[in-house]
Image (tube, helix red, strand yellow):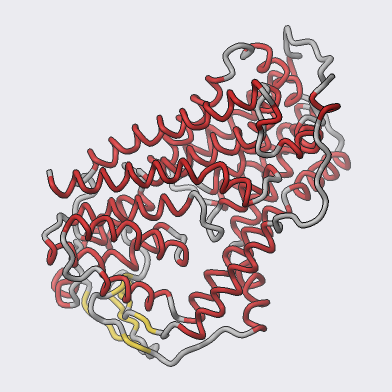
Amino acid sequence: MSDTETQAPTKKGLSFPSAYTVLFAVAAIVALLTWVVDAGVYNKLSYQGDKFEITYADGTTSDLPATQDSLDSVGIKADLEKFVNGDIYKPVGIPNSYTAVDPNPQGIMDLFQAPIQGMYQSIDVVFFVLVIGGFIGIVNHSGAFSAGINRLSHVMTGRETWLIVIVTALISLGGTSFGMAEETIAFYPILVPIFIAAGYDAIVALAAIYLGSSIGTMCSTVNPFSTIIASNAAGINWTLGLNSRLALLIVGTVTCMLYIIRYAKRVKADPTQSLIYNQKKEIEARFLKNVSADQDHSKLEKHHSLILILFASTFFIMVYGVSSLGWWFEEMTTLFFVSSIIIAIVDRIPEKQFVTEFIQGANDLLGVALIIAIARGVTVLMDNGMISDSILHASAAMVDGMDKGVFIVVMMFLFAGISFFVPSSSGLAVLSMPIMAPLADVVGVPRDNIVSAYQFGMGLMAFITPTGLVLASLAMVNVTFDKWLKFVLPLLGILIALSATTLLVSVYI
């Protein structure tokens, strides 16, 4: 009897809410916090080319000469060169400038407007996701993807574990080098069918991609959006602390691989052990609908091979553009749109058919785009309620006077908590580093440990925080948040222990 025939019926009744409901609940909690948490802001300093501009709590501004003396006078221990060459490009929080302000609690109307404002603020990411959907739709229509998966599944027979190792390692490398995060959205429609065809479930594909990205960004080595900008804002060279972060990157990535492989082997041997077994038929129908089991494995048609080369080249160009050419969402979105047109020409898809398939593909990822907008809406509520700086100020006061070992571990957890409210790595770096880094001097801890605590804390929270990319990633494979938590929490415990140990060794040795 087949797995499908013996599959347990889907339970009816109460079920875990969708990603949209989870995020809206988080937004409601944040809105409530704006009623009970005191509002306050730090003065911000921004570089204006020929001057520094300080924005005060009351909204007024003043100018300072763009000199090192000006930075020293406000207590920002960063080199002027970092502002001039663009390494620090966002407003920086000024130490000891926290000021309580009149509260601006967020009401019902603000709560419902926040996702709309979030859509406006994240339109670059939203449009990127929709164009990726259209791109995948065109490739699926060509039949090249189906042929490629059939061929690959045949070649990988008996060596499926290497899929996990290769995908996790490559995406971890992207995360540690240039902060590959949102870009991974493009990989789910490609890799999930491959993993399912190899006998795994969708969680294995999700884990290889999302855990790879998360552990890579958590242990960033040369990532300009976290390591370098945080080090610059802390007033130190980004190479300080590199060895400890590199060590944790290696150990953490291997740990993630082994954890995924252990689960994957259990699922492959007995599909009923899958955390999403009751969705097996539904997920296979969704991701393998374009894959024909009767297709010849021995060879690919020439035009299919050409389309797959164009397909793979698109991703190589994207990675190169982001890591070396300074590309961001506008350039990446353009790349996928142009690639869609080229593939349609190669496959001789009629113009009307191209438009139909592209729109249908974009429609498949519309839900993901909406989740990204709602998540950004949570940040809108925080900013409008003016409690982000208040939480940072309270955190800084909490660690004052601690033993250095306790201090550095508590700092990691504090950064994890703050990153729930400020999920942007660069945004958290420029906001928190000028405030937190001087505390290391008082305790007697090198400032590079503060940078590592920031990275590890924010990275650990990224595994589970609804305000990050996790819900958008789960929506790509139709896995609910509770199933993900059940899968990832044991691993998260291991990584917390490894991170705390790394910080303690850096402090005491």
Can you give x and y, in whole percent of width and height, for residue 382 in the image? 50, 75
Q: Look at 56% across and 30% down and name the residue there.
A: 263
Picture coordinates of residue 463 (x, y %)? 49, 49
Residue 344 is at least partly visible in this image? no
Residue 45 relative to residue 107: left or right: left
Q: Which quadrant is home to the N terminus?
A: top right
Q: Residue at x 52, y 69 (%)?
A: 379
Quarter of the view holding residue 6: top right
Q: Which residue is drawn at 70% across and 15% down?
A: 151
**Is 164 on the left or on the right of 295, as rendered?**
left
Above or below, 428 relative to 219: below
Residue 105, above or below 221:
below
Relative to 42, does residue 349 appear above or below in the rendering? above
- 427 lies left or right of 362: left
Query: Of 390 and 92, which appears nearest the observer?
Result: 390
- Residue 158: x and y, percent? 60, 11
Quadrant hosting residue 267: top right
- Image quarter hosting the C terminus: top left
Picture mark count: 0
Which of these two is toward me, 497 or 315? Answer: 497
Residue drawn where x is 29% and y is 54% of the image:
453
Judging depth in this view, the residue of 451 and 266 nearest the camera is 266
Q: In this view, does 361 lie above or below 17?
A: above
Image coordinates of residue 202 in percent, x first then y, are 66, 35
Is any part of residue 472 visible from this angle? yes
